[in-house]
Amino acid sequence: MKPPTKYPKRNVNIDCGKYLLRTIVPADATERWAHWMEDAEASEMLNAPRKAMSLADLVSYIETFDQRTKILIGIFEKSSGLLLGFLRNDVNFETRQFLVAMIIGEPEYRHSGVTMAVTVPFRDYFFGELGMEAMLATALAHNKPIIHYLYATGWTLDRTVPNAVKAHTGEKMFDLCFFSQTAEGWQAWKKMKGFK
């Protein structure tokens, strides 16, 4: 008999109005998702090779998440069921911190308000339900859309490391920005914006 797992598996299912946040499963791997990284904007902002993935690649990626301390959450449009993007979360229950990265993979849904629509329910889940005390993120300095979003939703820029990341092509080096938001900072931001 296996010993009990220290941290339970998370079955995330969060209503965000027009959108739904839920645990990604292998059946969510689709051809559309496989082609997200062919998009020039995504490739440039994430400093990733511009190429399609296979469905097998996606399933393998999904299976690297134990949904306990490595939690992969899909952003779905409720009306169509379309997967728009995801949030990957590395959770440290000992320090009560988690590292989050987000991508909106469907090009027509970028800059359309999706990220803002899921912000409050997502953070309330991690700070409230899971009892996290701090949220961490990194962003390449040239990724202006995500940096704008981070500032707009109350994150703090802790430091910028010059020439920290090598471009996936050529010799160019990119600066890397480290951001954080505390549970207290999140509550203060919500109060300032009129959220309960």
Image: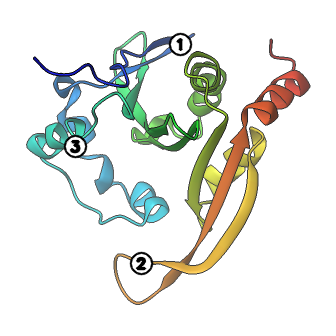
Amino acid of disc 3: Tyr
Q: CA distance from mark 2 to mark 1?
A: 36 Å
Q: CA distance from mark 3 to mark 2?
A: 22 Å
Camera-nearest label, 3 or 2? 3
* Front in this rendered view, residue 147 or 182: 182
Secondary structure beneath label 2: loop
Q: CA distance from mark 3 to mark 1?
A: 27 Å
Mark 3 is surrounded, within 10 Å at the Cα level, by few (under 14), some (14 to 19) or many (20 or more) other residues, namely few
Q: Which residue is mark 2?
A: 167
At a point 23% along the width and 24% down the height, the residue shown is 25
At a point 42% along the width and 66% down the height, the residue shown is 47
Above or below residue 148? Residue 115 is above
Above or below residue 121? Residue 41 is below
The tag on residue 61 is 3
* Front in this rendered view, residue 185 or 43: 185
Q: Is residue 9 left or right of residue 189?
A: left
Camera-nearest label, 3 or 1? 3
Q: Which residue is mark 1?
A: 18
The image quadrant of residue 12 is top left
Q: Is residue 188 left or right of residue 40?
A: right
